[in-house]
Amino acid sequence: MPAIGTSAKTLHHGLAAAAALPLLIGALASCGYGSEAVKDDAPKANVAADAKKLSASEVRIGYFPNLTHATALVGLQEGLIAKELGATAIKPQAFNAGPSEIEALNGGSLDIGFIGPSPSINAYVKSKGSNLRIISGSASGGVKLVVNPAKIKTLDDLKGKNIATPQKGNTQDVAFLNWISEKGWKVDPESGKGDVSVVRTDNKVTPDAFKSGSIDGAWVPEPTASKLVSDGGTVLLDETALWPDKKFVITNIIVSQKFLKEHADVVEAVLKGTVKTNEWINANPDKAKASANAKLAAEGGKPLDAKVIDPAWPSILITDDPLAATLKTQAEWAVKAKLIEQPDLNGIYDLTLLNKVLKAAGKPEVSDAGLGATK
């Protein structure tokens, strides 16, 4: 599938720009961790009286108010997921933190969630494979190393500098620690101290830390990366450059194993909605960008400024493919960094329903890289 912003470079800056958004960025923590869940009170699509009846009266869906969760943002904003659910109501819930979303899933207050690979891996391993399944991909890319150009001009200049990541052991932190290791530099993964000082900083304070000079750069997801660029930073590295085919998973769709077992028809309907949403996003990048920004404005009170969303949007690939082999690689990096023990990820994926939906839509099926659930 093409990137969501394939044509974004040629788009006019027609999205209504808001003033600076230091508070909104706090709501846009990607795979990093921050505050607790926020209830989504936006109006929901009306349900027709003759709408199809599924096995559950409602489905509770979690997501982050973040561009790398564009499938959720657009699918909810445009009613594309609700349309497939018929009489089953969507109960959306916005999270700013991977752990709080996993806690909600484990506690039975969430059924399906959009979330990053590291929280998915950690939760699956800690529960000994009992709490979740990854049922689809959602997004790839959208992670950049942004630096202060007055202090850092080349990648070698990172040595001795203070570089932020969202949280110890999160997806970006693991990738950065692996990059440092590949350079032959040493960093203690627990403290972050070493040849580079890895400063674990919540995305909501990273822009202010960057402007104050307390950090010299950051390895962060969008839109935080583009916010730093708008504050004078320079993109020194796009993480896609480090991956085969320039693809790596940044957002998965997960489901409670209990909900999957009891309400497979509802899960299938949600996946029909996400597949149609992804198709619409990739076919209509202008409209999709505006839709995602409208949903962000509903969440945070303001849309993203054009100077932030315009460069951020084309760096994210929206895809149904979970890119399972890259999740396996990310787990290996976390083991290498001594952040986790060697995990058993067998069974973390169940792509049965996704592949059924893709096949029915005339699209190619996707792989679980040998990590599928046994029947």
Image (cartoon, helix red, strand yellow):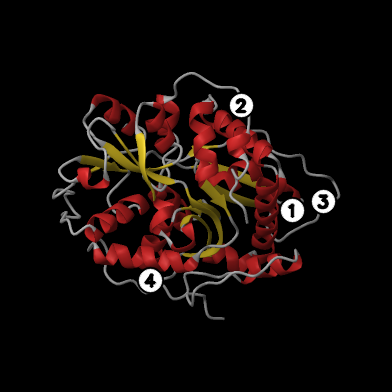
In this view, which residue lies farthest toward the front?
Answer: 154
Query: Which residue is the site of mark 3?
Result: 51
Specify the quadrant of the image occupied by residue 148. Answer: top left
In the image, what residue type sits under mark 3? Ala
Which image quadrant: the N terminus?
bottom right
Q: Position of residue 354 (x, y in %)?
A: 64, 66
Query: Which residue is the site of mark 2?
Result: 15
* Circle 4 Cα neighbour tier, 10 Å, few/some/many (<14 / 14–19 / ≥20): few
Question: Which numbered disc flags the more N-terminal residue, 4 or 3?
Answer: 3
* Circle 3 Cα neighbour tier, 10 Å, few/some/many (<14 / 14–19 / ≥20): few
Query: Which residue is the site of mark 4?
Result: 128
Q: CA distance from mark 3 to mark 1?
A: 10 Å
Q: Position of residue 81 (x, y in %)?
A: 69, 49
Question: Which numbered disc flags the more N-terminal residue, 2 or 4?
Answer: 2
Query: Residue at 54% of width from left, 40% of height from top?
Result: 313
Q: CA distance from mark 4 to mark 1?
A: 33 Å
Name the front one of labels 4 and 1: 1
Q: State the residue in front, 268 or 225.
A: 225
Give the total number of marks visible in the rendering: 4
Q: CA distance from mark 2 to mark 1?
A: 29 Å
Q: Position of residue 238 (x, y in %)?
A: 40, 47
Question: Which numbered disc flags the more N-terminal residue, 2 or 3?
Answer: 2
Query: Residue at 18% of width from left, 40% of height from top?
Result: 161
Q: Answer left or right for 156 relative to 305.
A: left
